[in-house]
């Protein structure tokens, strides 16, 4: 009996020892081997979700510090991600939050059971039913209180869900954004925000938080230059979060985008996005209130444009129809005005977007100064003359005979068909814009050499303002073989010498070419944003000074006794100019012609000696030539520039 007792005791002691060893081993594993890992997890459970403080986008200012775009405070209605997705109430929550959520739900169920004197199972059904009803009422109240339509909010919710889904795919799992509240209605004023806050208890997962919205004090002025902002796309957001995750410092984490952020889409807003956009602030703290990290927001920096907004507004009335005007300060290359018509009000752009985007007759969203190309017509003739004189293909005394056509009456005609211009040299050819002279000169130069000289004046590149620009199209022989699938013919160079045959440039290109001639052959890219001044390119073109003086004199005679004398001559202004009329294909919409006519030009610089400004005026689908239609407008540009102090 004693032996049996001893065996049982030993077995018990061995069992107890084994349990102790297992427990000790587990404690060693938990506290020594994986202690740091579990400690980190425990601390993370005690940390609240980060709070982000919005930044303020920088202002866009013009000369004399006048604002074109500013951020002003507003509010936004936010809904919890779980509300938007219709998913589980526990999605996107930490373990601590899930336990707290379940405890709260159990208390609510017990309260319903006690007050309604119903079984717990029925109370749970009633709780779920009431929550669903409250979710539905949330959407209705949000629409009623904010004035937004249900469709607008649902679209906002879809954008949010797509962004989070893209982020989930990029990270391969759950993301913290699933636990955030996201804005579904933005740009609320204070009165509306107060009204919404007073009824938040009737909603579920809703909150109101401060924000900022973009406002444009000058309305229509320079809207194409300013550009537009819009919400970041899912791809942009995912890429910003990826860079933030890869960064080791706070700066990298807070310089990205959050849901609902705006980014520059066009114009200066896009070109200067990195300057205008600030950095978020962030607060991280424990649930007991202890602050772990507090980083204040950093506001975006202002950008300063060279535009004179008052001159810009004055030139809108001068232009008066679809087209563009560009004015450049000759000594510095600064852009003083960039007028593009039709225009629109950036403050109402969101409401009118569908109407503006659907207008394919007038295309008001087009920036006609730098983003649309036009055939330059006779405005290229000063450049062609410089090419011929500098390369020795002609001299100042070289003459060609103009009978109103080149070889036969039906082909390569001159605009003056009543006997033509007779025997004419380069000075008279510029003065009277003789096509036949430039047909002959273009043939002597050849298509490739013409293209090289157009490239010297920047026509083959983007203008260089930093906006969403288009490079010019300057055909050469290789381009004709590749694009038109044919061999070059002499007519290609002849037509290119008068600004036709496929060459296309922007109004900014032409204005800057005039500034280059006015500077005696010094090329500078136009300067629009002062913060981008280091990127301004400069080069001295290899042009014969005597050729420059001759071409400038010819452009002066255009006003005094040439093609503009009857339309744009004023003894108060001693300036140089060039008229231009280019054949243009009609604009068709759904097979019907909605606009037809020529592209009319009037370009130049003033004054003749010691030029201060260069300008280009372009009118779309004109029924009159450049001198008759655009000449008076160009003269009025000079008058306005004098009124604002840019001409003596």
Image (cartoon, rainbow, N blue to C red):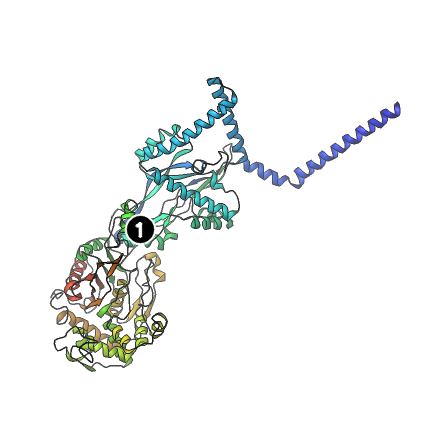
Residue 300 visible in image: no
Locate residue 117 relative to residue 583 in the image: left or right: right
Task: List the residue tagged with mark 1.
Answer: 60
Q: Find residue 48 and report its horizontal and vertical position in percent.
A: 50, 36
- As displayed, is residue 168 above or below residue 86? below
Quadrant of the image occupied by residue 46: top right
Residue closest to the eye, 265 or 611? 265
Q: Find residue 424 and report its horizontal and vertical position in percent.
A: 17, 79
Locate residue 334 relative to residue 174 in the image: left or right: left
* Number of numbered discs on residues: 1
Q: Find residue 622 and report its horizontal and vertical position in percent.
A: 18, 62
Residue closest to the eye, 406 or 578? 406
Residue closest to the eye, 575 or 602? 602
- As displayed, is residue 421 above or below residue 108? below
Residue closest to the eye, 281 or 348? 348
Quadrant of the image occupied by residue 368: bottom left
Instruction: Please report the residue visible at 37 percent of the width from the left and 42 percent of the height from the top.
Output: 155
- As displayed, is residue 385 above or below residue 535? below
The quadrant of the image that shows the N terminus is top right
The quadrant of the image that shows the C terminus is bottom left
Q: Residue furthest front?
A: 591
Q: Classify mark 1: helix, strand or loop.
A: strand
Q: Find residue 528 and report its horizontal and vertical position in percent.
A: 30, 58
Quadrant of the image occupied by residue 396: bottom left
């Amino acid at each position: 009996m004693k032996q049996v007792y001893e065996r049982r005791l030993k077995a018990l002691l061995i069992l107890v020892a084994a349990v102790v060893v297992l427990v000790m081993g587990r404690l060693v594993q938990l506290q020594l081997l994986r202690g740091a890992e579990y400690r980190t997890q425990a601390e993370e459970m005690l940390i609240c979700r980060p709070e982000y403080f919005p930044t303020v986008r920088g202002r866009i200012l013009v000369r004399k510090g006048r604002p074109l775009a500013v951020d002003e405070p507003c509010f936004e209605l936010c809904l919890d991600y779980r509300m938007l997705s219709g998913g589980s109430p526990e999605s996107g929550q930490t373990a601590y939050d899930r336990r707290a959520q379940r405890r709260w739900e159990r208390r609510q169920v017990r309260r319903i059971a006690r007050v309604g004197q119903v079984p717990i199972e029925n109370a749970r059904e009633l709780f779920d039913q009431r929550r669903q009803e409250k979710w539905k009422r949330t959407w209705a109240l949000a629409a009623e209180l904010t004035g937004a339509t249900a469709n607008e909010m649902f679209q906002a919710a879809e954008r949010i869900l797509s962004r989070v889904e893209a982020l989930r795919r990029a990270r391969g799992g759950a993301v913290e954004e699933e636990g955030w509240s996201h804005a579904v209605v933005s740009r609320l004023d204070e009165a509306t925000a107060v009204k919404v806050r007073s009824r938040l208890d009737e909603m579920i997962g809703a909150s109101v938080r401060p924000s900022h919205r973009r406002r444009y004090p000058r309305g229509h002025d320079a809207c194409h230059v300013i550009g537009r902002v819009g919400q970041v796309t899912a791809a942009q957001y995912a890429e910003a979060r990826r860079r933030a995750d890869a960064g080791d410092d706070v700066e990298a984490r807070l310089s990205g985008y959050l849901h609902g952020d705006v980014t520059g889409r066009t114009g200066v807003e896009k070109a200067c996005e990195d300057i205008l956009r600030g950095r978020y602030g962030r607060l991280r703290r424990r649930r007991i209130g202890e602050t772990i990290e507090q980083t204040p927001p950093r506001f975006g920096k202002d950008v300063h444009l060279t535009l004179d907004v008052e001159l810009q507004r004055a030139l809108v009335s001068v232009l008066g129809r679809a087209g563009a005007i560009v004015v450049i300060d000759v000594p510095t290359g600064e852009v003083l005005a960039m007028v593009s018509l039709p225009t629109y009000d950036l403050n109402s752009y969101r409401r009118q977007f569908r109407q503006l985007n659907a207008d394919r007759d007038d295309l008001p969203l087009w920036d006609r100064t730098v983003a649309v190309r036009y055939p330059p017509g006779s405005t290229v003739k000063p450049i062609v003359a410089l090419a011929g004189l500098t390369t020795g293909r002609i001299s100042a005394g070289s003459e060609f005979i103009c009978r109103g056509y080149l070889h036969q009456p039906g082909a390569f005609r001159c605009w003056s068909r009543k006997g033509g211009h007779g025997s004419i040299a380069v000075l008279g050819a510029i003065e009277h814009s003789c096509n036949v002279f430039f047909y002959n000169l273009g043939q002597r130069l050849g298509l490739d050499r013409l293209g090289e000289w157009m490239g010297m004046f920047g026509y083959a590149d983007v203008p260089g303002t930093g906006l969403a620009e288009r490079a010019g199209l300057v055909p050469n022989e290789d381009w004709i073989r590749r694009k038109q699938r044919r061999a070059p013919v002499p007519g290609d160079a002849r037509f290119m010498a008068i600004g036709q045959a496929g060459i296309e440039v922007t109004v900014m290109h032409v204005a800057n070419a005039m500034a280059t001639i006015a500077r005696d052959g010094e090329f500078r890219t136009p300067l629009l944003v002062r913060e981008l001044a280091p990127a301004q390119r400069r080069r001295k073109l290899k042009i014969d000074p005597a050729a420059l003086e001759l071409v400038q004199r010819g452009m002066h005679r255009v006003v005094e006794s040439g093609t503009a004398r009857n339309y744009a001559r004023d003894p108060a202004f001693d300036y140089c100019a060039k008229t231009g009329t280019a054949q243009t294909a009609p604009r068709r919409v759904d097979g019907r012609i909605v606009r037809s006519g020529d592209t009319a030009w009037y370009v130049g610089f003033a004054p003749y000696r010691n030029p201060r400004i260069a300008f280009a005026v372009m009118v779309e689908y004109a029924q009159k030539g450049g001198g008759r239609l655009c000449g008076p407008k160009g003269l009025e540009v000079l008058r306005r520039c004098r009124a604002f102090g840019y001409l003596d």
